[in-house]
Image: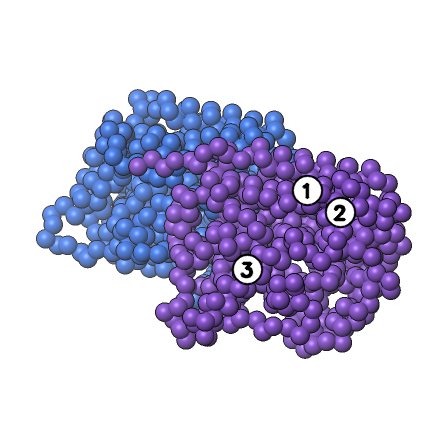
Chain colours: A purple, B blue
């Protein structure tokens, strides 16, 4: 899947080709405009993608979910499924589909929703993991509140697991990295890209690197050895107690690259990684999980310098700061992969099913209602779909917010002295 | 024919035990177990290893390795080759790529049945390589989907295929917070295993970790460290030892006696041949430790954890070790306090002394290894207060004058006792709380496990707990 914001170069699940020269991404790239995909096919990673993996249109979806879903969906659906089929057949054991898309536009959200539904119908036994970009308040697409609302319904109904991303949160993480760079010059900070920039001035490439890191970390246990392997299907079993509550907060420490190896004194300890990863400033969606209730959480550690007793001890400490739902006070999943990431000696990923995920949904709902109250731009959608779809999507979102709200605990569980 | 020659002839007709390693935890522990079985004895334990076809090759472990993903089994085989003393058989493993997703129902209801034929064949091949087959020992963790789910299914299948064989299940009890759905998996596993295995040995990761930290001074123990401790403990009751003839044990000897064989060096052979019967750990489970069908839960305690030198000045070297073992029967902490306070993740030690209770035992197997073991005074463990009145001859004692690896002196106590009550009760209460909120149930229902199936398992566990509470 392609979007304006994400190059889908990282699909590292069980890459079976051993020679580095001949790697081919297990990917299908879809866009209703040719520009971005063509750039990829000519760019530095061009040998990873073949044009037979791509489906492009010409005129785009006009930032209209209905155009993407109800026009391009049926029009391109078969061709897309064929390409997916040919990629799937090359896998010995297909674990999951990772769908990378943004929800603000027309293709990623509309056609993306259509594809999600089709995958549910045709590959019901295979996990569907979505990594969507939620639009932020300064999103330059005026219809993004409609598009995202409509897409979320599809995610609720057809995805197994969703790891939302907000550009605002990524920008803040990058800001903090730049501040830290002033203090420790060896810290890696992505260079500003020449291409399109987020309104904050940050390059999308830098922000995408963080998300790429997330996916690498998520799949590290599938690719490398460890003392406690965690497959993708284990994540869904452990983190999704009810079928629709599958929206996870994600955070990493370090978010990108740690300080260079020479500066051993600056290397964070494993304890520090744990304390950092639950802070609101490190979340990839704006929210403060410590202020809300955890339904379940997973801590996936990469690195060989620490072992299970360190991880277990840290979980014990963290528990005292985390509000756990009453029926799951020990709702943790630990993973340990021996291989550290490329640019840090150790790293930690936290995936949390936390009720604070309601906040981005509430923001989404507010923006939607502001626009829909006046029926602004609605006629563009009426051209392709029945307007009742808006009401259904709104109901679905409200249900989701309410359902999460039911598990919001009243008080933190107190520790006995 | 002289006794020793006769013994050497019989030596070739060894009882074989097949170890089934299932899941990540099971395979990692299994590797440590075979390593311990190999290195803690002076000669090859033929029950657990077979000679390779070509004499130049290394001995092969009598094992079947099973996992739902390939990495762990590959790593375990690689490590055994790297050690260079013994190996796993080249065709003794079965792996797939799917993973079981920590879902007991997926392992038990889906993957188990679909792999049944392949696993049966694999197991049969290993069993047929035993001259006389004594039974299975399984190594599995209870937290996940493979070891717990597929392991439970496999044992049910094997119970049907080998109705007269015996099974000991070595189950690893997870740390708190290893896996969100672990209490479901633990409860479902124990409920099913209780019906099909002869003995269920529960070993807590927490206990192993604490042993590493306190007794061995390893501040940050890894799984390898913990597995080494656990494997040594289990190996210490599996490697050869001999019952001593005592008047009260004659009844027991008749029922459990198998062919008398002498495996130790010939100098010991004479003295031990006269009146000793080798411990057959699997058969003795049925006749001795787990003779009552409702009491199957076992616990293992041993001392010391660090090799001590031979102390010739002490006239009673065994006294302190036996005293410590008895202390351990008390030392299992205030369970009632632990199960409530662990809700808040914090052990409450202030009321510890008020709740000290002894773990009552149905029966005990005491294994003493080292010089003077056959003369040790075991009266501490013959204490009638330990056992219910209906338990006849509850203490079995076996010894071997040979040291255990670097340990000149080693004492192990395999007990059919109530130490499983507290952790099982804790797991049950957690599972019930999640079940009442219907959390995760749809994940299990997807693979065919209904709410009623959970209720059945909850009741089964309650029944087991009730039995042990009555002791």
Q: Is residue B225 above or below residue A381?
A: below
Chain of the residue displaying label 3: A
Chain-order first, disc 3 or disc 2: 2
Q: Residue at x 82, y 37 (%)?
A: A388
Which residue is disc 1 drawn over? A365
**Residue B393: numbered disc:** none
The crowding category of the residue bearing disc 1, from other C-alpha atoms within 10 Å (few below 14, some 14 to 19, many at least 20), is some
Q: Which residue is mark 3?
A: A172
Tags 1 and 2 both on a single chain: yes
Q: CA distance from mark 1 to mark 2?
A: 9 Å
Chain ID for label 2? A
The x and y percentages for residue A74 are 88, 51
* Residue drawn at 68 percent across, 53 percent down: A135
The residue wearing badge 2 is A146
Residue A370 position, x and y percent, is 71, 43
Q: Is residue B331 left or right of residue A18?
A: left
* CA distance for labels 3 and 2: 26 Å
Is residue B100 shown above or below A212? above
- Write the residue at 46% across / 40% down: A323
**Residue B293, image quadrant:** top left
Name above or below for residue A350 compared with residue A291: below
The secondary structure type at the circle numbered 1 is: helix
For residue B81, say whether it is visible.
no
Q: Secondary structure at mark 3?
A: helix
């Amino acid at each position: 899947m392609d979007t304006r914001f994400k190059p889908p170069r990282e699909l590292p699940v069980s890459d079976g080709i051993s020679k580095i020269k001949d790697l081919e991404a297990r990917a299908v790239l879809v866009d209703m405009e040719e520009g971005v995909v063509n750039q990829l096919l000519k760019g530095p990673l061009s040998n990873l993608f073949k044009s037979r993996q791509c489906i492009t249109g010409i005129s785009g979806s006009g930032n209209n979910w209905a155009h993407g879903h109800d026009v391009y969906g049926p029009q391109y659906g078969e061709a897309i499924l064929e390409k997916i089929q040919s990629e799937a057949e090359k896998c010995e054991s297909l674990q999951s589909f990772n769908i990378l898309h943004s929800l603000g536009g027309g293709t990623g959200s509309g056609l993306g929703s259509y594809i999600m539904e089709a995958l549910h119908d045709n590959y019901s036994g295979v996990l569907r993991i979505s990594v969507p970009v939620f639009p932020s308040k300064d999103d330059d697409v005026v219809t993004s509140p409609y598009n995202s609302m409509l897409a979320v319904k599809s995610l609720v109904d057809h995805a197994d697991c969703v790891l939302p991303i907000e550009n605002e949160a990524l920008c803040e993480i990058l800001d903090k990295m730049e501040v830290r760079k002033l203090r420790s010059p060896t810290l890696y900070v992505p260079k500003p890209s020449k291409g399109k920039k987020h309104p904050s001035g940050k390059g999308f490439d830098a922000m995408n690197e963080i998300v790429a890191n997330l996916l690498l970390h998520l799949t590290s246990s599938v690719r490398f050895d460890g003392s406690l392997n965690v497959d993708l299907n284990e994540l869904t079993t452990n983190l999704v107690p009810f079928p629709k509550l599958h929206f996870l907060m994600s955070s990493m420490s370090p978010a990108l690259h740690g300080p260079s190896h020479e500066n051993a004194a600056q290397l964070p300890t494993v304890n520090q990684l744990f304390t950092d990863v639950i802070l609101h400033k490190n979340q990839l969606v704006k929210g403060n999980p410590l202020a809300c209730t955890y339904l379940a959480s997973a801590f996936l550690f990469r690195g060989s310098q620490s072992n299970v007793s360190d991880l277990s001890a840290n979980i014990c400490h963290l528990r005292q700061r985390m509000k756990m739902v009453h029926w799951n006070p020990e709702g943790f999943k630990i993973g340990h992969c021996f291989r550290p990431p490329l640019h840090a000696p150790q790293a930690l990923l936290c995936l949390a099913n936390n009720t604070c995920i309601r906040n981005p949904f509430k923001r989404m709902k507010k923006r939607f209602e502001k626009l829909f109250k006046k029926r602004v731009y609605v006629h563009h959608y009426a051209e392709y779909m029945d307007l009742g779809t808006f009401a259904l999507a709104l109901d679905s979102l409200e249900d989701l917010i309410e359902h999460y709200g039911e598990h919001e605990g009243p008080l933190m569980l107190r520790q006995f002295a | 024919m002289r006794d020793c020659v006769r013994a050497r002839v019989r030596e070739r007709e060894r009882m074989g035990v097949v170890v089934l390693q299932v899941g990540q935890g099971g395979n990692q522990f299994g590797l440590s177990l075979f390593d311990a079985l190999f290195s803690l004895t002076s000669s090859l334990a033929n029950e657990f290893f077979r000679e390779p076809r070509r004499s130049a090759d290394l001995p092969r472990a009598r094992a079947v390795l099973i996992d739902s993903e390939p990495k762990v089994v590959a790593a375990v085989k690689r490590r055994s080759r790297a050690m260079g003393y013994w190996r796993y058989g080249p065709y003794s493993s079965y792996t797939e790529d799917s993973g079981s997703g920590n879902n007991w129902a997926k392992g038990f209801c889906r993957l188990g049945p679909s792999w049944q034929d392949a696993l049966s064949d694999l197991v049969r091949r290993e069993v047929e390589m035993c001259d006389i087959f004594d039974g299975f020992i399984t190594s599995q963790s209870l937290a996940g989907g493979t070891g717990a789910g597929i392991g439970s299914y496999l044992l049910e299948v094997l119970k049907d295929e080998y109705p007269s064989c015996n099974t000991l299940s070595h189950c690893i009890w997870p740390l708190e917070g290893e896996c969100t759905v672990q209490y479901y998996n633990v409860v479902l596993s124990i409920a099913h295993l209780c019906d099909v295995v002869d003995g269920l040995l529960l070993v807590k990761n927490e206990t192993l970790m604490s042993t590493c930290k306190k007794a061995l001074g390893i501040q940050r123990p890894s799984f390898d460290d913990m597995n080494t401790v656990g494997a040594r403990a289990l190996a210490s009751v599996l490697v050869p030892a001999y019952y001593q003839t005592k008047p009260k044990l004659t009844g027991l000897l008749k029922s459990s006696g198998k062919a008398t064989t002498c495996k130790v060096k010939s100098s010991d052979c004479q003295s031990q041949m006269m009146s000793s019967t080798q411990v057959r750990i699997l058969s003795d489970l049925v006749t001795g430790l787990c003779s009552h069908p409702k009491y199957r839960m076992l616990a293992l305690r041993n001392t010391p954890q660090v090799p001590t030198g031979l102390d010739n000045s002490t006239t009673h070297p065994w006294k302190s070790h036996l005293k410590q073992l008895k202390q351990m029967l008390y030392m299992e902490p205030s369970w009632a306090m632990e199960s409530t306070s662990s809700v808040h993740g914090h052990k409450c030690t202030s009321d510890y002394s008020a709740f000290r209770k002894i773990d009552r035992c149905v029966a005990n197997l005491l294994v003493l290894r080292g010089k003077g073991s056959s003369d040790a005074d075991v009266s501490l463990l013959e204490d009638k207060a330990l056992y219910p009145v209906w338990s006849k001859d509850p203490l079995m004692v076996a010894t071997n004058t040979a040291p255990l690896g670097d340990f000149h002196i080693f004492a192990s106590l395999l007990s059919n006792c109530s130490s499983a009550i507290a952790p099982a009760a804790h797991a049950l209460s957690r599972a019930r709380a999640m079940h009442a909120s219907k959390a995760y149930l749809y994940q299990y229902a997807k693979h065919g496990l209904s709410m009623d199936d959970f209720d059945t398992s909850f009741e089964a566990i309650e029944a087991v707990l009730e039995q042990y509470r009555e002791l």
